[in-house]
Image: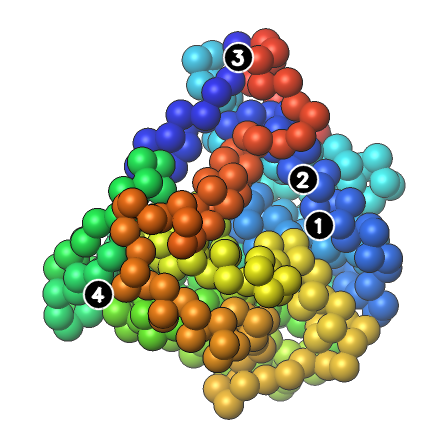
């Protein structure tokens, strides 16, 4: 079939296998061009490895440190009349490239929250690698079936305590409007915490620890976001922010467990606002990102997923000056985004943006380009008019 982007709301329902492979290769080439990561990890588990920061972490570990990697994800293969999800194509491309480079790679496609998948992954680590020296937790899921209770929890993106109104943008149509969101109730807050909080990260680490599959000095990192006050009602102080608070709680608990048992440490890395499948679903945030991109690109300080994680690995986690924590014990690689001069310019532009001047005052074009690249569209060297088989096998 000839595969074209079909955007519905904040998601593209098609993905291009050759385009996704080209996007993965761009990230691999970036890491390889920077050279080896000194003292990098050698045996890595990435939970949530098929897109965004998780995929960038897997690529950075494999092609920066020559690491053996195990990836956990939940993606859908193609059907006769449907393309696979981009994460499926990304993982297939990564696996092919890693195997070609002589690297160990193993994939688990399933429910990362389940006890059964944890059991299967632990068995593979024991049989193939012995122990893991880095665990990256980068799950982004709209729902979770609790492995102990069987209850299905669904997350939501809502403010807490009061109704919230602010500007947002339809990134497909380019229309700036005001959105009003009613506050979450207590059940919605609890459900979002159950899905996006830190309990599952703790379950993974506890399972690895109990099975003695963590190497001496083993490290674990989970990713988060804080952002400017402009977005706090819908993010930091909203349901997702409260869930991220629980992720931080879990990080401190895991860190204590690792230290007590003779391993390394666990921490939260607060990353930059980027165009991802997750961020595109959050009201207000896409407009903020469009403004932020314009400002940071003009200053020469813009980074994408792979640049962020490569910098984290090279300058703080491995071979650099060591981890640099803020007052709350978090590593901040959103530091360039949160510089006062950058945020002052964002604050100045925010009230000025309208549908009519959107293209002039923001980088909405760059936002759209990055959004479509997530699904394999707009990559150089790809013939998007060519007939292509959407069926791609995940190499064994």
- Going from N to C along the chain, the mark reached first, 1 or 2, is 2
Q: Position of residue 146 (x, y in %)?
A: 35, 55
Residue 159: give its label.
Answer: 4
- Residue tagged by mark 3? 2
- Going from N to C along the chain, the mark reached first, 2 or 4, is 2
Q: Which of marks 1 and 4 is in front?
A: 4
Label 3, label 4: how far apart the Cα atoms are: 41 Å
Q: Are marks 1 and 4 in contact (CB under 8 Å)?
A: no
- Residue tagged by mark 2? 24
Outermost bottom residue: 327
Element marked by disc 2 = helix
Question: Vertically, is 308 above or below 388?
Answer: below
Label 2, label 4: how far apart the Cα atoms are: 35 Å
Name the residue at 54% across, 86% down: 326
- Going from N to C along the chain, the mark reached first, 3 or 1, is 3
Q: Position of residue 57 (x, y in %)?
A: 65, 56
Element marked by disc 1 = helix
Name the residue at 29% across, 45% down: 356
Which of the pair 121/231 is nearer the observer?
231
| Left or right side of 237 for 333 | right
Name the residue at 78% across, 45% down: 29
- Going from N to C along the chain, the mark reached first, 3 or 4, is 3
Image quadrant in which you'd find residue 167: bottom left
| Left or right side of 358 for 24 | right
Q: Do the residues labelled 3 and 4 touch (CB within 8 Å)?
A: no
Element marked by disc 4 = loop
Name the residue at 19% across, 69% down: 160
Q: Are marks 1 and 2 in contact (CB under 8 Å)?
A: yes
Report crowding for label 1: few under 14, some 14 to 19, many 20 or more residues within 10 A (C-alpha): many
Which of the pair 216/280 is nearer the observer?
280
């Amino acid at each position: 079939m000839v595969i074209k982007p079909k955007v519905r709301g904040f998601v593209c329902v098609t993905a291009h296998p050759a385009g996704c492979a080209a996007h993965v290769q761009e990230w691999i080439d970036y890491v390889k061009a920077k050279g080896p990561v000194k003292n990098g990890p050698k045996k890595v588990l990435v939970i949530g490895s098929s897109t965004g920061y998780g995929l960038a972490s897997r690529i950075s570990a494999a092609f920066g440190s020559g690491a053996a990697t195990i990836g956990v994800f939940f993606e859908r293969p193609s059907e006769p009349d449907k393309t696979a999800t981009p994460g499926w194509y990304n993982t297939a491309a990564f696996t092919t490239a890693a195997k070609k480079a002589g690297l160990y790679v193993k994939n688990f496609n399933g429910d990362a929250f389940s006890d059964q998948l944890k059991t299967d992954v632990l068995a593979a680590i024991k049989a193939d690698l012995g122990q893991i020296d880095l665990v990256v937790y980068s799950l982004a899921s709209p729902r979770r079936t609790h492995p102990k209770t069987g209850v299905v929890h669904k997350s939501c993106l809502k403010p807490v305590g009061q109704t919230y109104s602010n500007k947002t943008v339809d990134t497909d149509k380019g229309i700036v409007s005001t959105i009003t969101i009613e506050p979450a109730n207590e059940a919605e807050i609890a459900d979002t915490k159950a899905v996006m909080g830190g309990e599952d990260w703790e379950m993974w680490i506890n399972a690895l620890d109990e099975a003695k599959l963590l190497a001496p000095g083993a490290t674990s990192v989970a990713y988060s976001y804080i952002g400017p006050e402009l977005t706090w009602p819908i993010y930091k102080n909203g349901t997702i922010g409260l869930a991220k608070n629980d992720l931080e709680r879990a990080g401190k608990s895991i860190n204590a467990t690792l230290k007590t048992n003779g391993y390394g440490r666990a921490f939260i890395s607060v990353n930059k606002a980027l165009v991802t499948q997750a961020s595109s679903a959050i009201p207000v945030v896409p407009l903020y990102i469009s403004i932020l991109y314009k400002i940071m690109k003009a200053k020469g300080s813009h980074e994408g997923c792979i640049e962020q994680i490569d910098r984290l690995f090279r300058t703080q986690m491995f071979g650099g000056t060591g981890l640099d924590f803020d007052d709350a014990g978090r590593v901040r690689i959103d530091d360039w985004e949160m510089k006062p001069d950058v945020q002052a310019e964002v604050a100045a532009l925010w009230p000025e943006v309208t549908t009519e001047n959107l293209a002039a005052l923001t980088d909405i074009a760059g936002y759209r380009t990055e959004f479509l690249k997530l699904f394999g569209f707009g990559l150089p060297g790809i013939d998007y008019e060519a007939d292509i088989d959407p069926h791609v096998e995940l190499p064994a």
